[in-house]
Image (tube, grey):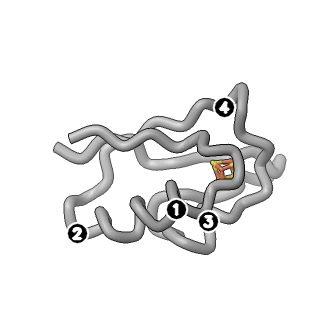
Amino acid sequence: MLKVTVDLDVCQDHGQCVFAAPDVFELDDDGRLAYVGTPDESLRADVEDAADVCPLQAIRIEG
Ligand code: SF4
């Protein structure tokens, strides 16, 4: 199963991942990153793009 974790101690909430994978990542009303931990397999390419564009390399993909 595709599993996504973000190191929120590292993440600075700039949201590049939100543009790359809007079905997985979003900024909540407080501007903090929220995300789906077990997105559908069909979103794998988007998640990989998000991990690539994250300037802090805070996104980890398993599975
Ligand atoms: S791109 Fe990286 S640093 Fe920016 S909000 Fe997403 S996880 Fe956080």
Q: Tag 4: residue type?
A: Leu
In the image, farthest residue toward the top: 9
Does the beta carbon at disc 3 come under 8 Å from ligand 1? Answer: yes
Where is residue 22? Give x, y as percent: 53, 70
Real-space CA distance between mark 2 and mark 1, rounded to the nearest whole angstrom: 14 Å
The residue that appears at 68% across and 47% down in the rendered structure is 33
Which of the numbered marks, if any, corresponds to residue 50? 1
The residue that appears at 79% across and 56% down in the rendered structure is 14
Residue of label 4: 8
Answer few, some or many: residues within 10 Å of disc 4's Cα (few below 14, many 20 plus, some between 14 and 19).
Answer: few
Real-space CA distance between mark 3 and mark 2, rounded to the nearest whole angstrom: 16 Å
Query: Dot 2 lies on which element?
Result: helix
Where is residue 44? Give x, y as percent: 29, 63
What is the number of callouts on the image?
4
23 displayed left or right of 30 = left
Single out the mark in the foreground, 4 or 1: 1
Q: Tag 3: residue type?
A: Val
In the image, farthest residue toward the left: 1
